[in-house]
């Protein structure tokens, strides 16, 4: 009677990301360099896994060849792995295993830790496929452990459900549940929706197997909600089916109906005909059990129509069988017989022994109900001959007893009845046994779960710790980077600022040298010579003035000029002043032979502002005496000294007659200039001494101390 | 005294004319020119004693004019804006020059000095060195003016130049020695690009004449003629580097 289909998916990674990338990859391949080709071959290979294994193999071989040429061991290992997978999918497990082993060796040799886990996992699938569950389990567990030590969460996420499935297959439910739960945590942390879905479904299945319907239903419902969230209609119908089956077994037939109805509706919308057939058939079956034969027949017919459409003979046989039951329930034995025969002929074609036995039983019972005793006996004996399934056998013994009784063969009837009771008892005991076992498993599961819970807390705290470490280290790196950035920024800012200061100071310097007073005084002097008809002096003055201007403009472009050029420029300046002031000014420039005038370098016009001060504020304001400026250059071990001495009115007096702005300006700008030159000019200085003779000011003495800079 | 003035800028030409006629006695301006064609005929036909010449005339230079003349038997005083290469060549040939804008006092002094010392033969030699250096586009000869005479030497002949106060002594091949009343600095500037190097405050050497660098006694240069030239500490490294690639 059980035709309900339990759909379950055992592999967490059912879907491979396949889309239209194949074509675009093939296009890209043409223009790619060798390294890029490697990657593309690999992508192509994995794209073809789900469509054409021969093509996948071709690309895997191309990739392998190229990787060997490039000695790229990562891709050599991947190539062998791909070849293994191709053969694995083809069912050629021996070569697949060989390829995987080769890949594994290469991965070991070149320490490709992330691949070792994956390859082990793949080898596990071979063992699983060949039924060597212990070996498969070993492979999966090794992969899981390895990935766990390498914090390869993706790998762990792949292995956990595989391990769970093996345990499930071996009936080790607590272990299965443990790994499915691990998988659930991993998948949700990796945001792997399909992984989460698989874990929830597998958990539902595990609890369903131990008849913990409540838990199972909870997981299925969670899974269903997720499928709705990710808008996967395919998986939604899948979960609805599972829930329907669960509730049917649980005895909640209305709920079961409800789920199957929903599944059927969704299947129709998404044109998932296969599922539509399953759902419809299951609905029909439940209505049969509820003795609502009309409804049952309606749904079964509907299912049959679609089953014929998709040419699924297996389910057709199942539907015919159920329709036979419906008609039989309506006492339409003729029609029931028709459907049972149809079902039987399909089943015979497919050599499904148990199903054939069921068909024979159904036909026997149908004949018996019509009092066609000999026909019934024939079918029933046929069933008895081939039956394996105990439930069918029990029912068939009972039928045989009944037939024999009706045929007035009480001894045979009694014998069959005895057989029926015996088998029934044994099955009941085993059923009971199973029930007890299930209860025990439930208990163990709960116990394990509490263990797992405590374990999980540790893992969680470890994970939290790990996360914390990662967080702290990434934070540290971020801070470091930030500091570096700030450093660079500050450095650049400072450099910019220095550059700007230099530019500004140079500008100021130029302006101070091109002091408007000096220019106007010079031009006024020229004017004066013209007016006094001294054209020659005017002309001479003008040309010297022009030469000085040129010198100033040219030298101001340089950071340093030779001391000889500096002295020349200062001389020109003083000559001009002298021409203007006549006898009022005399000057002397002393340069001993020991001063390396051609070798030494100074900032251009370094002394000029002070000389100008001496002239304009010291000498010019003097009434009586001759003004005199003495300039001396002295080179000692470590410094060049420039002494500027005047016999003018002194600073105090100058301050009284004029605001001291200009004077301090000379010091200020020179100090700024010295500062710009940095470390070399650390000891550079300007010293100003006021000269007195019996407390009468007799002038000013200035000493500029510069480091020795040679060309 | 007969002079010609060649200057393409009319304002400057007039200024010079004014200075000459107003402040120099016994002088006659026998010709002026503002382009090279006129300059050529003017210099050729008027037979001046002194020529005041601008260097750049329009698109051309005065050197192109001088090149075409068969003989240059007049004294040249160049009037130039500061152009490095031309000035170097002029200086090497010991010809007078005045930098623009013209300082009348300077011009007057220069003209007065010239009028006393015109020796057509010497002027011709100096001009020829100049034209040679300019047309060869490489400075190869230098005119050394002593108190009595002028000597023309080629640069490869010079072994070294030594400063002696405001004099410079040239040491030449075959033990010749010429003392010139010019600062060593001037020759340093003129010859720095001609494979000469100032190894010391008072020594300028022809690098082609160096035999070796000796490390003893604080390091000195041994010249091909056997003389030893001191090298200042500061110059040592730079010199060694230059010698290495030489």
Image: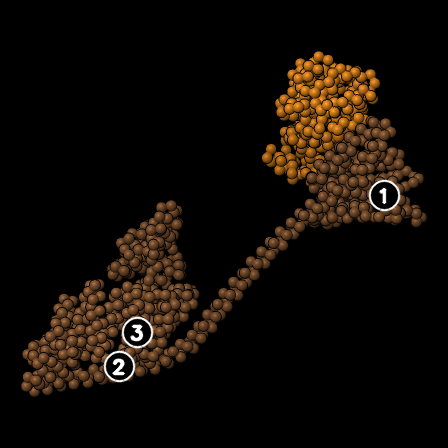
Left or right side of A130 for B137: right
**Chain A colour in the picture:** brown
Q: Name which residue lies at 49% across and 65% down.
A: A470
Disc 2 chain ID? A
The mark that comes first in sequence, 1 or 2, is 2
Disc 1 chain ID? A
Disc 3 chain ID? A
Left or right side of A599 for A461: left
CA–CA distance in space, label 3 to label 2 = 28 Å
Which residue does the numbered mark 3 point to in the structure image? A259
- The answer to whether A362 is drawn above or below residue A709 in the figure is below
The mark that comes first in sequence, 3 or 2, is 3
Which residue does the numbered mark 1 point to in the structure image? A617
* Residue B176 image point, x, y percent: 71, 23
Q: Are marks 3 and 2 in contact (CB under 8 Å)?
A: no
- The answer to whether A586 is drawn above or below residue B181 in the figure is below
- Same chain for labels 3 and 1? Say yes or no: yes
Which residue does the numbered mark 2 point to in the structure image? A434
* Residue A385 image point, x, y percent: 11, 76
Left or right side of A116 for B157: right
Q: Name which residue lies at 83% across and 34% down.
A: A525
The mark that comes first in sequence, 3 or 1, is 3
CA–CA distance in space, label 3 to label 1 = 109 Å
Total tally of numbered discs in the picture: 3
How crowded pointer 2 is (Cα within 10 Å; few <14, some 14-19, many 20+) is rated as some
Q: Name which residue lies at 63% across and 54% down.
A: A490
Q: Quadrant of residue A550?
A: top right
């Amino acid at each position: 009677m059980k035709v309900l289909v339990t759909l379950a998916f055992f592999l967490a990674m059912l879907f491979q990301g396949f889309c239209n990338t194949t074509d675009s990859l093939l296009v890209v391949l043409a223009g790619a360099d060798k390294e890029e080709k490697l990657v593309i071959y690999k992508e192509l290979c994995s794209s073809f896994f789900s469509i054409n294994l021969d093509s996948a193999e071709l690309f895997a071989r191309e990739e392998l060849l190229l990787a060997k040429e490039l000695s790229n061991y990562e891709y050599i290992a991947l190539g062998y792995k791909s070849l293994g997978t191709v053969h694995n999918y083809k069912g050629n497990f021996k070569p697949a295993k060989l390829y995987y082993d080769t890949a594994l060796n290469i991965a070991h040799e070149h320490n490709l830790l992330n691949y070792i886990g994956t390859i082990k996992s793949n080898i596990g699938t071979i063992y699983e496929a060949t039924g060597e569950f212990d070996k498969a389990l070993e492979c999966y567990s090794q992969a899981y452990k390895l990935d766990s030590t390498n914090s390869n969460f993706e790998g762990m996420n792949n292995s956990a459900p595989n391990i769970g499935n093996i345990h499930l297959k071996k009936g080790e439910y607590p272990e299965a549940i443990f790994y499915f739960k691990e998988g659930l945590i991993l998948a949700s942390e990796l945001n792997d929706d399909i992984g989460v879905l698989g874990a929830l479904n597998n958990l539902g299945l595990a609890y369903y197997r131990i008849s913990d319907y409540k838990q199972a239903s909870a997981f299925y419902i969670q899974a269903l909600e997720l499928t709705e969230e990710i808008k996967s209609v395919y998986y939604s119908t899948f979960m609805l089916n599972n829930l329907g089956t669960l509730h049917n077994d649980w005895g909640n037939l209305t709920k079961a109906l409800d789920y199957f109805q929903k599944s059927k509706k969704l299947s129709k919308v998404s044109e998932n005909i296969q599922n539509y057939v399953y759902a419809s058939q299951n609905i029909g079956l439940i209505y049969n059990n509820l003795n609502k034969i009309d409804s049952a027949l309606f749904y079964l017919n509907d299912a049959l129509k679609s089953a014929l459409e998709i040419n699924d003979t297996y389910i057709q046989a199942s539907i015919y069988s159920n329709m036979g039951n419906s008609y039989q329930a309506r006492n339409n034995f003729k029609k029931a017989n028709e459907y049972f025969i149809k079902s039987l002929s399909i089943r015979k074609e497919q050599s499904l022994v148990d199903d054939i036995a069921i068909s024979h039983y159904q036909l026997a019972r149908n004949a018996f109900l019509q009092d066609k005793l000999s026909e019934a006996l024939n079918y029933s004996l046929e069933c008895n001959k081939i039956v394996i399934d105990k439930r069918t056998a029990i029912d068939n013994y009972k039928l045989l007893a009944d037939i024999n009784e009706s045929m007035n063969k009480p001894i045979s009837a009694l014998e069959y009845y005895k057989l029926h009771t015996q088998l029934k008892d044994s099955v009941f005991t085993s059923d009971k046994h199973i029930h007890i076992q299930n209860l025990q498993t439930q208990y163990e599961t709960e116990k394990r779960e509490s263990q797992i819970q405590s374990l999980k807390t540790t893992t969680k705290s470890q994970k939290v710790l790990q996360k914390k470490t990662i967080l702290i280290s990434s934070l540290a790196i971020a801070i470091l980077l930030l500091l570096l950035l700030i450093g660079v920024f500050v450095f650049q800012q400072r450099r910019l600022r220095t550059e700007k200061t230099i530019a500004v100071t140079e500008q100021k310097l130029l302006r101070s040298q091109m002091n408007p007073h000096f220019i106007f005084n010079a031009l006024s002097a020229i004017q004066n010579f013209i007016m006094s008809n001294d054209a020659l002096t005017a002309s001479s003055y003008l040309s010297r003035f022009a030469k000085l201007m040129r010198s100033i403009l040219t030298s101001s472009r340089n950071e340093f000029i030779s001391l000889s050029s500096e002295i020349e420029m200062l001389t020109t300046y003083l000559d001009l002043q002298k021409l203007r002031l006549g006898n009022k000014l005399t000057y002397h420039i002393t340069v001993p032979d020991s001063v390396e005038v051609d070798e030494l370098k100074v900032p251009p016009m370094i002394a000029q502002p002070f000389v100008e001060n001496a002239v304009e504020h010291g000498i010019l304001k003097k009434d009586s005496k001759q003004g005199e400026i003495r300039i001396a250059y002295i080179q000692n071990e470590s410094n060049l000294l420039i002494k500027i001495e005047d016999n003018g009115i002194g600073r105090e007096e100058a301050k009284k007659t004029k605001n001291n702005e200009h004077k301090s300006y000379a010091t200020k700008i020179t100090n700024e200039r010295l500062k710009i030159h940095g470390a070399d000019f650390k000891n550079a200085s300007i010293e100003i001494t006021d000269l007195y003779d019996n407390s009468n000011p007799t002038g000013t003495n200035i000493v500029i101390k510069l480091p020795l800079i040679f060309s | 005294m007969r002079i010609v003035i060649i200057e393409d800028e009319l304002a400057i030409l007039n200024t010079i004319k004014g200075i000459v006629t107003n402040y120099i006695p016994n002088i006659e301006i026998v010709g002026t020119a503002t382009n090279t064609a006129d300059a050529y005929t003017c210099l050729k036909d008027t037979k001046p004693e002194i020529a005041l010449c601008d260097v750049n005339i329009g698109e051309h230079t005065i050197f192109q004019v001088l090149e075409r003349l068969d003989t240059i038997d007049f004294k040249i005083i160049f009037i130039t804006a500061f152009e490095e290469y031309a000035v170097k060549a002029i200086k090497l040939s010991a010809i007078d020059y005045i930098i623009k804008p013209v300082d009348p006092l300077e011009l007057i002094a220069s003209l007065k000095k010239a009028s006393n010392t015109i020796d057509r033969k010497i002027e011709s030699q100096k001009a020829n060195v100049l034209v040679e250096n300019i047309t060869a586009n490489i400075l190869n000869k230098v005119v050394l003016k002593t108190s009595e005479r002028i000597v023309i030497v080629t640069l490869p002949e010079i072994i070294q130049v030594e400063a002696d106060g405001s004099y410079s002594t040239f040491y030449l091949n075959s033990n010749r020695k010429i003392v010139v009343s010019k600062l060593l600095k001037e020759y340093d500037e003129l010859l720095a690009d001609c494979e000469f190097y100032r190894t010391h405050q008072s020594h300028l050497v022809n690098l082609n004449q160096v035999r070796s660098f000796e490390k003893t006694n604080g390091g000195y240069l041994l010249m091909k003629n056997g003389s030893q030239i001191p090298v200042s500490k500061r110059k040592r490294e730079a010199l060694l580097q230059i010698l290495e690639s030489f």
